Amino acid sequence: MKNPWLKLPKKKPYILKIDLCVIKEYNNKANSSNRIRQNLLPEPFLGNPKSPIILLNLNPGWDRRDNSFHRQRQFRRVNRANLLHKKTEYPFYLLNPKLSASLGYKWWYKRLHELIENFGCRTVAQKICCLEFAPYHSQTFKQFNSPLLSQKYDFHLLKQALKNNALIIIMRSSKYWQRAVPELKKYKNKYRLKSWRNPCLTKANLRYQAYKKLTRILREN
């Protein structure tokens, strides 16, 4: 399947043309917390989709402080490289120490800190990828009236990961993901976090078998 993010506009609003009608209709009715933030660069996925560990999340969040960071040249450069699947030292770019001042780095470091402390940022960034159910930023998520055409690409990436026998860890919204990709329901190598309200990948928040598999993959060369 062709990557639709090749056609992301260079200037805001950062919405794909194929999604524009649905987003406009949605935002006309949405409250301030649900509204899609069109001035922020989308993050439909973080990292290399061919990674052996795939996290399934809901959508990238929003905070007022994100606005200034998304305007910075360095952030825009690594975001675009991620969208185009370019090879980088930190494919999961929000774990790049150079972006440690960003809210995205702080959010993900908190969720992955136990793995980072044991295996290092670089290893985690190279072996873990996160797929977001919806690609655009909002403070809270509400399902769209109509599916976004761009979502099909993440569903395609997930199907490819299932074929590659990737370890799948569902952080949030299992029902959305399983409805979109029915193959996930019977997939054996998938696990859910014990608490989705505090979606940290820790020994305490994962089943023993899941944590064992996760750490084994991160330990491998």
Image (spheres, rainbow, N blue to C red):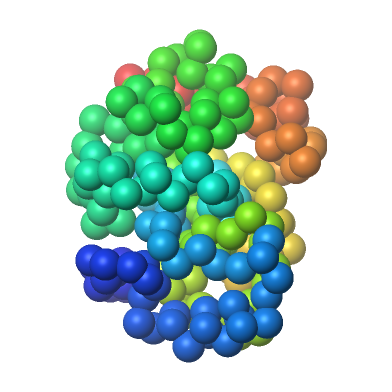
**Of residues 14 and 199, which is closer to you in this image?**
14
Give the position of the N terminus as an image quadrant.
bottom left
Residue 38 drawn above or below residue 187: below
**Quadrant of residue 36 in the image?**
bottom right
Q: Residue furthest top?
A: 118
Q: What residue lies at 59% left-to-right and 26% top-to-bottom?
A: 110
Find residue 132 and report its horizontal and vertical position in percent: 53, 56
Q: In this figure, what is the number of numbered marks?
A: 0
Front-most of residues 206 and 164: 206
Q: Is the residue 70 above or below the residue 106 in the image? A: below
Q: Is residue 89 visible?
A: yes
Q: Quadrant of residue 143?
A: bottom right
Q: Foreground residue, 187 or 77?
A: 77
Q: Quadrant of residue 177?
A: bottom right
Left or right: where 86 falls relative to 134 = left
Does any portion of residue 53 appear in the rendered image?
Answer: no
Please give the name of the residue rendered at 63% of the width and 55% of the height, measured from the top-left corner: 139
Position of 154 with respect to 71 (left or right) is right
Residue in the image at 74% along x and 28% along y: 205
Quadrant of the image for the C terminus? top left
Front residue of 89/17: it is: 17
On screen, residue 146 versus residue 86, left or right, reads right
In percent of the image, x 35 and y 37: which residue is there?
Answer: 93
Q: Is residue 38 above or below residue 100?
A: below
x, y percent for residue 44: 44, 58
Horizontal and vertical percent position of residue 174: 71, 57
- Residue 23, how many percent across, how many down? 52, 79
